[in-house]
Amino acid sequence: MATNNSINSVLELTNFTVDPGASGDSYVQFAINTTDEFRIGVDDDAGDAFKISQGGALGSNDTFIMTAAGERTMPLQPAFLAIRTSDATNVTGDGTTYTVVYNSEVFDQGGDFDGTSTFTAPITGRYRLEGSALLGDLTSSHNGGFVRINTSNRVYLWQSDPGASRDATTNEYPFTAFCLADMDSADTATFGLQVVGSTLTVDVTSNGSTDPRTWFSGNLEV
Amino acid sequence: MAENNSINNTNTSLTIDPGASGDSWLQFSINSTGEFRVGVDDTDSDAFLISQGSALGTNNRFRMSAAGERTMLSQPAFLTYVSPTVTNVTGDGTAYTVILNNEVFDQGADFNTGTGTFTAPVTGKYRLQLSVWFDEVTSSNTSSYIEIVTSNRTYRGGVSNLNIRRTKNGTADQVTSFVAVLADMDVSDTCTTIAMAANSAKVVDIGSVGPTQLRGAFNGTLVC
């Protein structure tokens, strides 16, 4: 067995097996000018999962993890879930357009959500986005409105009559929208809404961090 | 067998070529046990595969076609529905736990059709989408919601006046509510679903038409 050898020429093989022996990771390192860029292989300390790790250490900066059973996670893939944990009161109802402000992040892989309202695409791709805002204090006079996911390239808009459709007991109605959006690097996405027909008395509600009722989530899909 | 070799000259590379036929692969073993094999499957249209074990083409966990179409047939993912329709389960304010008793698919076998429960096999971010088809809605059903209930938090949607939203379809009064989220779930966390209609008697049904027309469904997948 050859171990930790340097190969100083083009290597051509009919197949290639890496085996560290009784223990340790089994890996191939991709380096450029002695800088370790990516390492791929099987992590002996992680249930023999197959990983693609950035840098020179399998198990650090894992970008792709495939368990033996085939469950694939990508801990650094851009993905976020932002929620409201308390009500935002009197934000629309008279035609005011309100961009929902989220006061808590459940997760923000990549750190691309600004902590309030805006997700910024770190790279060009197709992003799946969805959100829901539970409107409160609706009356029958709030007879129109829309919810929209605003991206730099285009707007995804749903219209409805929240006053008529509201829950008669709670006077609530959810504005929900979703899309698979084309976003270029540095493009932004927000979640906005507008209710018309009456006064500025409509709330965007929540019931705490474990029952948020208003959220905005998304991820880089492809 | 080559082990832990490094290629460290500029413009050097590693090429694996079995010759006229056969797979081109790189195997990662530990103590002589083949753990994963990656490479190109000569008998699968030259697709790039990541296969668990020591046989490319068996236990495929990741497949990239030459055209760039990526599939992962062991990635946790499910699509479930109710059939036949369950009758008189809510309407009076009962928060009914929907028993999604049929599966279109359940990659990973993480969904329990007896209880309507999905259990996360690994920690990750899961996209969950629920639509509930209410049937036999009455003029008194002016309050309702549906929920995706995970161990970490609950996502409520469909809060509405079913009577206003219902559509007339023969003698049945029907309406569909929807909610979706990208949720954080830890390994072994569970997820169930709730449907509630209120302000009448317990006469509202939950259901679907059957496997080829899903008027209500619950689906999810491990995203990242």
Image (spheres, coloured by chain):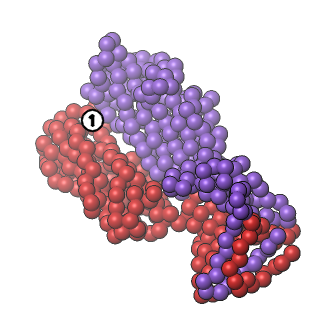
Chain colours: A red, B purple
- In the picture, the quarter occupied by the C terminus of chain B is bottom right
Determine whether A50 is above or below B217 in the image. below
Q: Position of residue A116 (x, y in %)?
A: 34, 64
Residue B189 seen in the figure: no
Q: Position of residue A175 (x, y in %)?
A: 30, 44
Q: Position of residue A184 (x, y in %)?
A: 34, 65
Q: Position of residue A80 (x, y in %)?
A: 44, 60
The quarter holding residue B203 reads top left
Q: Residue furthest front?
A: B20
- In the picture, the quarter occupied by the N terminus of chain B is bottom right
Q: Residue at x 82, y 79 (%)?
A: A3
Q: Residue at x 44, y 69 (%)?
A: A111
Q: Residues within 10 Å of mark 1 (few under 14, many from 20)?
A: many
Residue under pointer 1: A166
Q: Amino acid at mark 1?
A: Arg
The quarter holding residue A171 reads top left
